[in-house]
Image: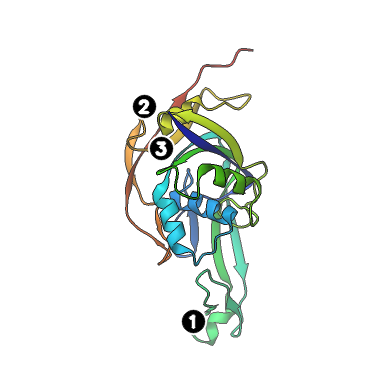
Amino acid sequence: MARHLLLRLEAPLMAFGGETIDNFGVIRDFPALSMITGLLANALGWRREDTARHDRLQERLVMGARIERQGIRLQDNQNARLGAKDVGWTTWGVPEERAGGAGTYESPHRRFRDYHASQSLLVAMRLEPSDEPPTLDGLAAALDHPARPLFIGRKPCLPSCRVFAGWQDGASILETLQSATLPVPHPTSMRAQWPDGEGTLPGDRLIELCDERNWTSGVHGGWRPIREGRLRFERQPG
């Protein structure tokens, strides 16, 4: 049995970002490995320039999630009128300006961003090796006393409850997701995602997922095998 740290991801709005196409910020159903890495790094107070630490934490992270309450999807339409001297903030530290001639300033800068509304997920995770810093205990302490405010996917997405949700022993990620305490009331089934090699379910599907970030270049690359399936639970009496 291995000890797993549990995270509660719950907020009025959350965003599990996928591939951004032009000005459309799409979302996935489950949090990416890179997103959970960033959440933990933010709690620890790491800076974006600490790329080696981010990469190593991501390499050690073994995680899966179950959807305990299915929310709805919302799309935010963001419009900003930018003048010739206006610049935008970027994560790579270089201001971004509008390209093109004078006519480009007549139309607004438009973006569309998707969100999960009123959704709740439970994440189960462990670190391999377990004794290398940061440890699970160190991460649990950082989540309860974060160096900076935490957000779930995008900065407006502030958690509505305690992110650290306790501990659960399990021989695998799937077993941990199956045995973790259920919400009250709970549905009779929950969609779940976990790494290949961490258990199987009847009818689950094996897919290749690109959700690892190269923290030095800032881009995602590489594929890892994961499984998606449905956890089944007994119906509650009453």
Confirm or deny contact between disc 1 and disc 2 (CB under 8 A). no
The mark lying in front, picked from 1 and 2, is 2
Q: CA distance from mark 1 to mark 2?
A: 51 Å
**Residue under label 2:** 201
In this rendering, would 24 be left or right of 207? right
Q: Residue at x 49, y 81 (%)?
A: 99
Q: Residues within 10 Å of mark 1 (few under 14, many from 20)?
A: few
Looking at the image, residue 177 sits to the left or right of residue 11; the answer is left
The earlier-in-sequence mark between 1 and 3 is: 1
The quadrant in which the N terminus is found is top left
Side (left or right) of 221 relative to 124: left
Residue 142 place in picture, x, y as percent: 60, 49
Nearest the camera: 225 or 185? 225
Q: Position of residue 238 (x, y in %)?
A: 64, 12
Q: Which mark is residue 52?
A: none
For marks 2 and 3, the one nearer the N-term is 3
Asked whether residue 20 appears in the rendered view, the answer is no
Coordinates of residue 110 in the picture (x, y in percent): 56, 67
* Residue labelled with disc 1: 99
Q: Secondary structure at mark 1?
A: loop
Q: How is the image coloured?
A: rainbow
> Is disc 2 surrounded by few (<14), some (14 to 19) or many (20+) residues within 10 Å?
few
- Seen in the picture, residue 95 relative to 151 is either above or below; the reply is below
Check residue 194 in the rendering and tell me which mark sits there, or answer none: 3
As shown in the figure, which amino acid type bears the numbered disc 3?
Trp
Q: Secondary structure at mark 3?
A: strand
Marks 1 and 3, Cα distance to the nearest angstrom? Answer: 43 Å
